[in-house]
Image (spheres, rainbow, N blue to C red):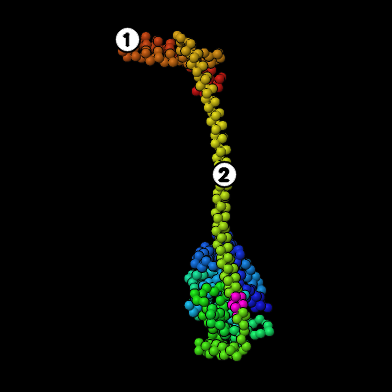
Amino acid sequence: FFDSIRFKMASAFYEAPTSFLVNYELATAVREKYPEEPDLVLSDVLELIDTYRDLKVVASTFYFDDGTEAELLCITGTIPVVVRGSTYNFPVRIWLLQNHPSYPPTCFVVPTRSMKLPDAGQNPHVDPTGRIYLSYLSNWSRSFSRLRPLVEEMRHTFSSHVPLFARPTQPAPGPYYNAGYSASQTSSSNYNSTPTYTPSYTANSYSTSGYPSSNPYANTNSATPPSYTPSGPYGSQTLASSQASQASQASQASQLPSKSDEDDDEALRQACLSSLRDTVEVSASRRLEQFRDGKVDAITQLTGQISELSFGTVQLASMQQDMEQQKRTLTAALHQSEQQEQQLDEAIAELEKLEGLEADDVFVVKAPLHRQLLELCADDATYDDAIYHLHKALDRGDLALADFLQHLKRIASKQFMARALINKIRLSLDIVR
C-alpha cells in the first residue's frame, strides 16, 4: 500500500511549476522547515538554482513509506544530460527532508507524458517508482555533501544509464496498414529495447527510436536523435544486433503493401506539428517564468521600499511633534524674557529720574523689627571700626593708655548691648545667622 503511494507520488507526469519560492519567501520557508542549519541550507539551495536556472523551489507534501506526510521543500525542474552527443533535459524532483543536511535528500525522476520509467532491473540507478540511487547519496556527509555536486553526479550517471524511455507508439487502426513504418515487437522477457520505426521514405527521414523528436525536453543538434538502448537484466543490445534488427524490419516492411504518399506526408506533418507544439509550450512556459520572476523581484523591492517609507513617515511625524513642543516652549520663554526686559527698562527709567539720592535712602525697611535690626547691625559695625582706630592710636602713641581703656570700656559696653539685642530680634524673627 505504501509502495503504491510512493509510486503514485513519484511517477506522476512532470509539469513545470506555476508558482515557486524566491527571495524572502524562500528564506522564510527554509528557516521554518529546517531550523537546524537554515543558513547552510539556504546557501546550498541558492547555489543550485543559480547554476541550473530550470530548477525551481516549491513547498509541497511528501508521503513517507510508513504513511505519514510532511510539508517539505522540493527542488523540481529539468537538468541537462548529454547522451551520445545530444543534450536531453530530464525532469527530476529533489526532496529536502526535515533533518537536512544531516541526512541526504530523496530524489526522483519524473517522466513526461511521452516518456516512461524503466522496468525493474533495467536501470541500476532508477527503480520503477522513479527513485534515484547514487553513490553520492549513499556516502552523504553533513560537512562536505552539497546539492550542486549531487546534480552533477546525476548528469554524469544519466549520460551512461538513461533514466527515461520513449513510450511505444501504436499504429492508428484503419483499412490499410502503414507500410512506411515497421515496429519491433517488445515482450516481457526483452524490455530493455524500445520500439524502432524505419520510414520507407528517404527525404526528411523521421525516426522515433530512442527518444522521439517531438519530446519537449530534447535539445539535439541533429535532425535525428541518436538511438540509445540501455542495458537490462538480460544483457545489453549491441550495435550490430540493432542494425540487424532494423534490416529485418525493413525487409518485413518491404513485403507489406505500400501506403500512399499522402498518408506518409500526413504522418510527417502530424509529427512536426506535435514537436512544434511541445517546443512552443516549453518556450512560452520558460518566458512566463522569467517574466514572473522579474515581476516578483520588482514587487518584493517595492514592498521593501514601502515598508521603509512607512517607517520613515512615523519617525518624521514623531520628530515634527517634538519640534512643535520645543517651539511652544521657546515661544513661552521668549515671551517671559520680553516681559522681564520690559520691567528692567521701566526700573532703569525710574532710577534715572532720581538724581542726588543717597544710598541710605534706597533701602527703606517698613517693618519696625527689621528697621531696628538694620540700625543695630550698622551700630555694631561702627563700634568695630571705633575699636580698630583706638588700637591704631594707642600703637602710634597718640592716645594714652588710660584714655584708651576708658574709651574702649564705653564702646565695648554699647557693642555688647547692641549684639544682645540683635540676637534677640533674630530669634523672634526666626532668622538663622
Would you identify the image quadrant in which residue 299 lies? bottom right
Q: Which label belongs to residue 398? A: 1
Compare residues 139 and 349 and report the one nearer the observer.
139
Q: Is residue 325 above or below residue 112?
A: above
Q: Position of residue 421 (x, y in %)?
A: 51, 16
Q: Is residue 298 above or below residue 209?
A: above
- Residue 281 in sight: yes
Q: Which residue is mark 2?
A: 313
Amino acid carrying label 2: it is Thr
Would you identify the image quadrant in which residue 271 lies? bottom right
Q: Which region shows up in magenta?
A: 264-271
Instruction: Please report the residue visible at 37 percent of the width from the left and 13 percent of the height from the top.
Output: 389
Q: Earlier in the sequence, mark 2 or mark 1?
A: 2
Amino acid carrying label 1: it is Asp
Instruction: Please report the residue visible at 55 percent of the width from the left and 62 percent of the height from the top.
Output: 290
Q: Quadrant of the N terminus?
A: bottom right
